[in-house]
Image: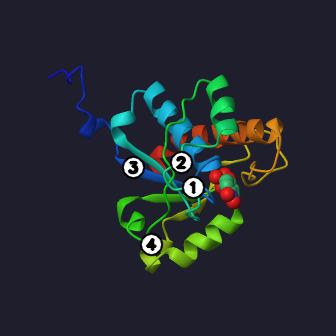
Amino acid sequence: MMPPRIIPPHLRCKPVSVLFVCLGNICRSPAADGIMHSLVEEHAVADCWTIDSAGIGGWHVGDLPDKRMRVHARRRGYELTHRARQVREADFDRFDLIIGMDAQNIDDLRHIAPTPEAMAKIYPISRWMGRVASPYDYVPDPYYDGAEGFENVLTLLEDALSALLSDWSTL
Ligand code: 4NP
């Protein structure tokens, strides 16, 4: 018998849930969140992915991403509409992967993780970086930088998140 032409999503995709984390949840992690949403839509696999972002700190809870981040992202076709929130212990139950943008984020996440199983879900974004030439093995905080800092964040994230999507079967 011929296979059905339209494969139901639950048969063709392995569900995965990803939480991106940075310090304030107004620059890097909402950009990662927006880029990843855009990538999975482009590849018609959005039904299989749960994507969110959060911050280590709570200073900006409820805020839209930083205006500069939104402007630079919009120029590349990403509309960033996430509202900032703080990471909570329950996130370690809800998500398969918790991805920090730099070494300090990873250290802070390890302190928040309630169990060894939760700790095992923490990954540095650097795991998926390095496919474009760059001096960075983390995504640097652009908050006190000029325009080039925000562009750098987007370039590094576009590269890393395409690699994350390619690695889907191994997640
Ligand atoms: P993010 O950048 O961690 O990429 O969102 C920051 C935004 C705000 C602050 C620090 C980093 N802050 O201290 O308010």
The residue at which mark 3 appears reads as 16
The residue at which mark 1 appears reads as 60
The N terminus lies in quadrant: top left
Element type at mark 3: strand
Q: Disc 1 versus disc 2: distance between alpha carbons?
A: 5 Å
Q: Disc 3 versus disc 4: distance between alpha carbons?
A: 16 Å
Q: Amino acid at mark 2?
A: Asp
> Residue 121, image x and y in percent?
48, 65
The residue at which mark 4 appears reads as 118
Mark 2 Cβ and ligand 1 under 8 Å apart: no
Position of 89 with respect to 105 (left or right) is left
Which is nearer the N-term, disc 2 or disc 3? 3
> Residue 60, image x and y in percent?
57, 55
Residue 63's label in the rendered image is 2
Which is nearer the N-term, disc 3 or disc 4? 3
Residue 156's label in the rendered image is none
The residue carrying pointer 3 sits among few (fewer than 14), some (14 to 19) or many (20 or more) residues within 10 Å by Cα, namely: some
Which is nearer the N-term, disc 4 or disc 2? 2
User: Which of the two discs, 1 and 4, sits closer to the camera?
Assistant: 1
The quarter of the rendering in which ligand 1 is drawn is bottom right
Q: Disc 4 versus disc 2: distance between alpha carbons?
A: 27 Å
User: Are the residues tagged 2 and 3 within 8 Å (C-beta)?
Assistant: no
User: Which of the two discs, 3 and 1, sits closer to the camera?
Assistant: 1
